[in-house]
Image (tube, rainbow, N blue to C red):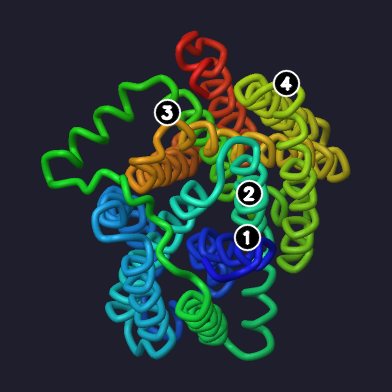
Amino acid sequence: MRLGYGITILLLTVLAALGMLSTNIYLPAMPVIGQALHADAAGVQLTLTVYLAAFAAAQLIVGPLSDRYGRRPVLLAGLVLFIAGTAACLLAAGIATMIGGRMLQALGACAASVVGRAMARDLFEGAALGKALGLIMTGVAVAPGFGPLLGGVLQEAFGWRSAFAFVALVGAAVLAAVLAGISETRPAATVRPTAATIAGGYGLLLSTGAFLIPALATTAAIGALFAFFAASPAVFIEAFGLSPIGYGLVSAGTVFGVFAGGYAAPRLMRRAGAMPSIRIGLILVLGGAALLWLADRNGGDLAGAILALLVFLFGMGIVNPLAVAAALQPFPQRAGAASALIGALQMAGAAAGAALVSLLPLPAIEAMPAAMFAAALLGLIGAIRQPAAAAQTA
């Protein structure tokens, strides 16, 4: 690594956030994209579904590849794929091209996200790793808040293709920065897996409490977050009466809760330890979901809902970096595989949280906090029932 600490953290943050930014920056333009590409709503929705599926599945392959062949070549290949896929979306004349471009984009964003986390594990240890991942995961959590607002502004000013042009420029800038400033970070003693050892490695991770307990904590938190994403436009625009821009401003404003949680996380960890801090964060996530339910039940209390979201996101800002750090810490020789498995679990949690909102036989204003509460409760139960051996390792 040839960059200073601050630039290194910034670059690793952008790498980790590319996936979230690409997931939702184009969401405000989906109706317009359908009209422009002569596709129905199901076809346009498939561009998101394919992206999430490809992103989740690819993580299980990308991580071991980075352990075997090195972080830098896998990252460079991923960024090239990302730029190519984004360009295909930018130039798409039909929905099939858009779907194919989104798949390539997801594969590239996945490589950036997985390798970025593995590089953080390569470069930092202990409290320094928790601090670095706190900053990185805060950036990842902020991207979904600002993405729709940025996408909406770009669409109004320049049309729907401008969102993909912006993402392509970000990808090109990151590629240039990696080429100029990042050398190989994989430890020399890293296990170089074969197909057989990849499966065995994932089995080992999933059977180890030191990995599984914190990994499930961040999975639950992400599930709660995506339950919010799935229903919040309907809740805030239809139930609370906000305009789309007003909704975007609320989403952008509440990310300061994530900033505050990310700032507090390493300080809380130094005082209380990793797993107790993760439990505190999950309690805040749970409390935020309960407060949101009360705000919704109280005739649509917008101020109360925003306060509830700030509490929820403050807890998210604590849980995610500390849980990821706790899961990666015991496995320096399998950092790529561990990072990949965490990412796959998080995406599975995201899909489950979003699906739960639509499956609950409740209106969106009630289904959203109920799904958020259920996801957070599952994560908290798992963290409380943590085995003693896992606590010592984490």
Q: Amino acid at mark 1?
A: Ile
Q: Secondary structure at mark 1?
A: helix
Residue 280 or residue 151, whichever sits in front: 280
Q: CA distance from mark 2 to mark 1?
A: 7 Å
Q: Which residue is mark 1?
A: 9
Q: Amino acid at mark 2?
A: Ala
Q: CA distance from mark 4 to mark 1?
A: 25 Å
Q: Secondary structure at mark 2?
A: helix
Q: Secondary structure at mark 3?
A: helix
Q: Which residue is mark 2?
A: 132
Q: Is residue 148 visible?
A: no
Q: Which residue is mark 3?
A: 211
Q: Which residue is mark 4?
A: 272
Q: Position of residue 340 (x, y in %)?
A: 36, 47
Q: Residue at x 48, y 44 (%)?
A: 354
Q: Amino acid at mark 4?
A: Ala
Q: Quadrant of residue 75?
A: bottom left
Q: Position of residue 301 (x, y in %)?
A: 85, 40
Q: Amino acid at mark 3?
A: Phe
Q: Which numbered disc flags the more N-terminal residue, 2 or 4?
A: 2
Q: Which numbered disc flags the more N-terminal residue, 4 or 1?
A: 1
Q: Nearer the viewer, mark 3 or mark 2?
A: 2
